[in-house]
Amino acid sequence: MTIPPPAIDPITLEVLWNRLIAVVNEQATALMRTSFTTVVRESGDLSAGVFDRRGNMIAQAVTGTPGHINSMATCIHHFLAVFPREGLRPGDVLITNDPHKTSGQLNDFTVITPIFGRDGRLVAFFGSTCHAIDIGGRGLGADARSIYEEGLFVPIMKWREAGEPNAALVAILRANVREPEQVLGDIHAQEAGNEVGGARLLEFLDEFGLEDLEGLSDEIIARSERAMRVAIAAVPDGVYTNAAYCDGFDKPLRLAVTITKAGDSVHVDWAGTDPESPRGINVVLNYTHAYVTYALKCALCPEVPNNEGSFRPVTVTAPPGSLLNAQPPAPVAGRHVIGHFLPGIIFGALARVIPDRVLAEGAANIWSTQLTGRRQEGGAPWTYVWFSCGGTGARPHSDGLHTTAFPSGVMGVQVESIESLTPVIVHRREITRDSGGAGRFRGGCGQEMEVSSRTDLPWNLGPVFDRTRIPAGGYSGGSAGGRGAIRIAAPDGPTRELVDKSQVALAPGERFTLQLPGGGGFHDPFTRDPAAVLDDVLDEIVSPEAARDRYGVVIDLSNAMVDEVATAALRAKNGR
């Protein structure tokens, strides 16, 4: 494919690019600082970006998740199909939570603001996607049987028209969600972020004497596309395949990928993936596309800006009606629990050709925990959701990271925030020892959280989780990570373990424990430096028993040292 030669000199372009990134970062900062929920302001479950008037995403803020930003990147044409450019006016703000046109679940609102120049011409769009703490229905979970059970569906419509709020939509939202002030407050925060971004963009255009973004957009997008194609071209042509299993809802499900690399383009096809589930773990195609493009950028050219240009060399298909191309009215609330597996499966396919540029399998999906209840008998309902992270897979040359979200990038919430905003107590939060897969480079560990309620009323747990049956695999001889689990304990009764993703009614006094999975290891564990094993034992990441059995390293804890003679004998016995 022929891409136009550079039209802006590199130094000028670098100045303009950095200023544009500063604009979208300020947009995201304004959004997070005005947010009403910890989901946005602390976990960073959001995206923010700027688009040219044709709907091409030019730049994104540093903060954001791939599932939000990469699916939002392709959404403007959906909005323009309903509200053409010619009919938009200053003060208009557009909104939707249509899963098939934006971020794949009803809890995610996308807010788009057209920006008009000093002369009244449309010059750009600012957009953001945020996870709403509640959207009504059953609450965030994976056990719905259709999208109609999952909450309120808002088609593409105007949130504001010429500055005037859509009072009917506000009233409908207020009447259908459990925490109206937080939900509406976050939508207003998205609005505010877009307004801040728009104001800074107009200052940017004035400063550099630009009438619009089209010329700059073309240059940035062309350079990004060119760099992405160069990176793709460096990989040998071929067809690379991989398949993996996830827990599914009540039985394991197969995800299969075929990557066809030819010249400077890549086609990724998910034929062979299981059909869509009757429960809410299905993934819409735009969310599948989002995590495919993210995975390929991570493996091939992470330094290239993430925009319209970096997407163009990649095409993605999945059979309609499959788990990764669910059709309405399939339930999709837990789409991330499957969607977050996709980068690991792509890495597995590419491991045979670029083994030094991929991670071993990790915990993959973030675990989302939604709690609902009442603060007192007959009182108003409360709901709260937080995200927890397991361990990442080991890298070819370094250990995996503990309790770190990959590929989503979402952050965990501090215990203090959870306890101050809800009638919840977090009794324990700690690294799960021995949960990182063994290898020359160890997988990251998961964590455990033990939680109860301060009230004497029943409450509900809506868990969305995976890797309780099938652990994260290791690469090149590395071992699998530890499996996860969710356990519920009565005050004086037995402990039961959840086996599917159904919501659970908790009795007063019951506690639940989240045990998140660890990541897989990389390379033969018996080639790990014994000193690194000793450090892990002293840090209580690895037990002395696991050091001996998994790594062939004998630790003398009385002197905090490796027993080198015993270690050498043990490794020789195992033929390593």
Image: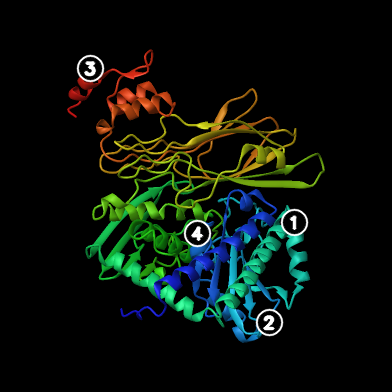
Question: Residue 107: in sight, yes or no?
Answer: no
Q: Which residue type carries mark 1? A: Pro
Q: Position of residue 384 (x, y in %)?
A: 67, 46
Q: Secondary structure at mark 2?
A: loop
Q: Secondary structure at mark 3?
A: helix
* Spatial CA span between label 2 and label 4: 30 Å
The residue under the point 50% across, 65% down is 18
Instruction: Give whichever of discs 1 and 3 has the lower sequence position.
Output: 1
Q: Which residue is mark 1?
A: 180
* Spatial CA span between label 2 and label 3: 78 Å
Instruction: Give whichever of discs 2 and 1 has the lower sequence position.
Output: 2
Q: Which residue is mark 4?
A: 67
* Spatial CA span between label 1 and label 3: 66 Å
Q: Which residue is mark 3?
A: 565
The image shows residue 513, relative to residue 256, as above or below, that is: above
The image shows residue 344, relative to residue 448, as above or below, that is: below
Q: Which residue type carries mark 2? A: Arg
Q: Which residue type carries mark 3? A: Val
Q: Which residue type carries mark 4? A: Gly
* Spatial CA span between label 4 and label 3: 50 Å
296 to the left or right of 16: left
Residue farthest right in this picture: 378
Instruction: Give whichever of discs 2 and 3 has the lower sequence position.
Output: 2
Instruction: Give whichever of discs 4 and 1 has the lower sequence position.
Output: 4
